[in-house]
Image (cartoon, grey):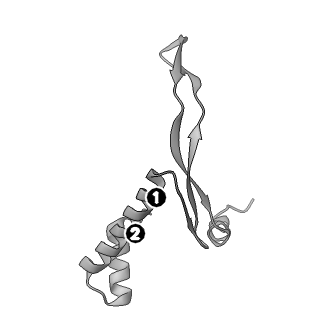
Amino acid sequence: MTLTKRDLVMRISEETGLVQTQVFDVVQKTLDYIAESLATGGKVELRNFGVFEVKIRKARVGRNPNKPDTDVPIPARATVKFKAGKEMRAEVLKLTPKS
């Protein structure tokens, strides 16, 4: 199941009794501030949820599967990493199939 921004807005609106447009504005502003912080190289730490941070991936050499003899240089680049918080990790671990 996929949870979309619209689903979030509708669920929060139903639970709080707030108008969906107000909830949408709050959710969108929250996401905007998280993206803005990451875009400036910052770190976003949401207790009991997780940590978003920017990491720089090293430059490396890749291979084109259609032309395996040809090396393709892949430049270094910034990417966003997410590390789940303790409580989220515990909840997700419950999904592990039993052997």
- The residue lying furthest to the bottom in this view is 17
Residue drawn at the location 52% of the way across and 25% of the way down: 74
Q: Secondary structure at mark 1?
A: helix
Q: Give the tally of numbered discs.
A: 2
In primary-sequence order, the first of circles 1 and 2 is 2
The amino acid marked with disc number 2 is: Thr
- In the picture of the structure, the residue carrying the numbered disc 2 is 30
In the displayed structure, does residue 5 sit left or right of residue 96? left
- In the picture of the structure, the residue carrying the numbered disc 1 is 37
Residue drawn at the location 57% of the way across and 40% of the way down: 56
Residue drawn at the location 59% of the way across and 25% of the way down: 60
Looking at the rendered image, the quarter that the C terminus falls into is: bottom right
| Residue 66 - label | none
- The residue lying furthest to the right in this view is 99
Q: Nearer the viewer, residue 83 or 92?
A: 83
In the displayed structure, does residue 27 sit left or right of residue 72? left
The amino acid marked with disc number 1 is: Ser
